[in-house]
Image (cartoon, coloured by chain):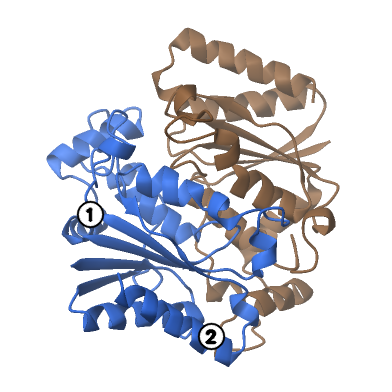
Chain colours: A blue, B brown
Amino acid sequence: MHVLIICAHPEPSSFNAALRNTAAETLKKQGHDVKISDLYAMKFDPVFKKEDFRSRTNTRVFNPYPEALHACETKSFAPDILSEMEKVRWADILIFQFPVWFSSWPAVMKGWIDRVFQAGFAFTFTQMYGGGLLKGKKAILIVTTGAPEVVYSKGGPAGDIHMLLQPISHATCEAAGLEVLPPFIVFNAAAQTEEQGKAEIERLKKRLTSL
Amino acid sequence: MHVLIICAHPEPSSFNAALRNTAAETLKKQGHDVKISDLYAMKFDPVFKKEDFRSRTNTRVFNPYPEALHACETKSFAPDILSEMEKVRWADILIFQFPVWFSSWPAVMKGWIDRVFQAGFAFTFTQMYGGGLLKGKKAILIVTTGAPEVVYSKGGPAGDIHMLLQPISHATCEAAGLEVLPPFIVFNAAAQTEEQGKAEIERLKKRLTSL
């Protein structure tokens, strides 16, 4: 299968990077083709903006939805958007690998979604969820949290992590038609021992081997 | 009171901008002091990154949490972060005004949070929620959605908008100690008639007059 790993961590030697590398190596060993969009390394611009639409239908007032539909038809998005769209088209599985910041993905990854999952490419107002335009592809979240599991439990201070990830897993990925597999979550990542970290890496290998 | 409006929409003549202007004018008429951080106009950089930490405790490996605590002590964040922190300190109320994109805030506003709500400024691992460092201040979300209310209802395709906003209202704002007032939501904003838009503007004026 074709796997696109979209990842975002500011430190190339971080535990998140180790998870990303483990995922890539494990999948390659299984015979899958892997591409990586390392958003920090690419210095990906996360700001959805007018300038991304190089052939506007209305140059006076910028209205994102109709401009996105038009840019899909005319392939007139900014080059970095077109390039990421090409990778998404190629992929059978999208892996989003990130540290959970404020119970969500880092801004640079939210911006990858804002700019790449355009109307007309990932969804339209009448083609979402069951009819989402990326139907047939799958998604997995591979994430770390700074806080321990109890903080992200039902009844914990933050609340159930699976509920907090709904805007991502359900209202972004499933909205675009992606089948979302169970997330791989490493809690308390900052405070884990080297041994615990190694055990999590092994757990990830096992998970991805039986993909 | 001191009100800081943080807003993000790429079109200065958008309905979102009208909501922002209405909020500012209404609050000023009530005698409040208003500051605005218009993230698109400011070209705010939303990417949380090493370079924001100008006096690192560990220059070899970048570990965000301890570096943030150190940068708070030494006031050594990048100037744009320090400037936004100053506005937050000044404010009694933070208003987040944005279009809901993928059931969340635009990347540029998520990045404002990632970079401004630093550990040591908005929270620490032992000072969150009831002990959040911005305790005593309030927050309001003033948002628009592209989809109609039924999409964002309990049992609707996206699910209850109040649940989807939990990572923002609860796990970001309340985590930082902010008291979160009920959100002001305009559904189906893109498809509303001019008359409906005017009615929503009046509804916002009324809401903010009785703040």
Chain under numbered label 2: A
Circle number at residue A85:
1
Contact (Cβ within 8 Å) of mark 1 with mark 2: no
Residue for point 18% across, 67% down = A1
Q: Is residue A51 left or right of residue A196?
A: left
Q: Classify mark 1: residues with Cα within 10 Å, few (<14), some (14-19) or many (20+).
A: some
Instruction: Please say if A194 is above or below A58.
Output: below
Name the residue beneath numbered marker 2: A197
Q: Nearer the viewer, residue A12 or B15?
A: A12
Label 2 element class:
helix
Q: Nearer the viewer, residue A48 or A175?
A: A175
Residue for point 13% across, 40% down = A74
Three-letter residue code for mark 2? Gly
Q: Residue A89's spot in the image, x, y percent?
A: 18, 55
Quadrant of the snapshot with the N terminus of chain B: top right
Chain under numbered label 1: A
Q: Nearer the viewer, residue B103 or B136?
A: B103
Residue furthest front in the image: A210
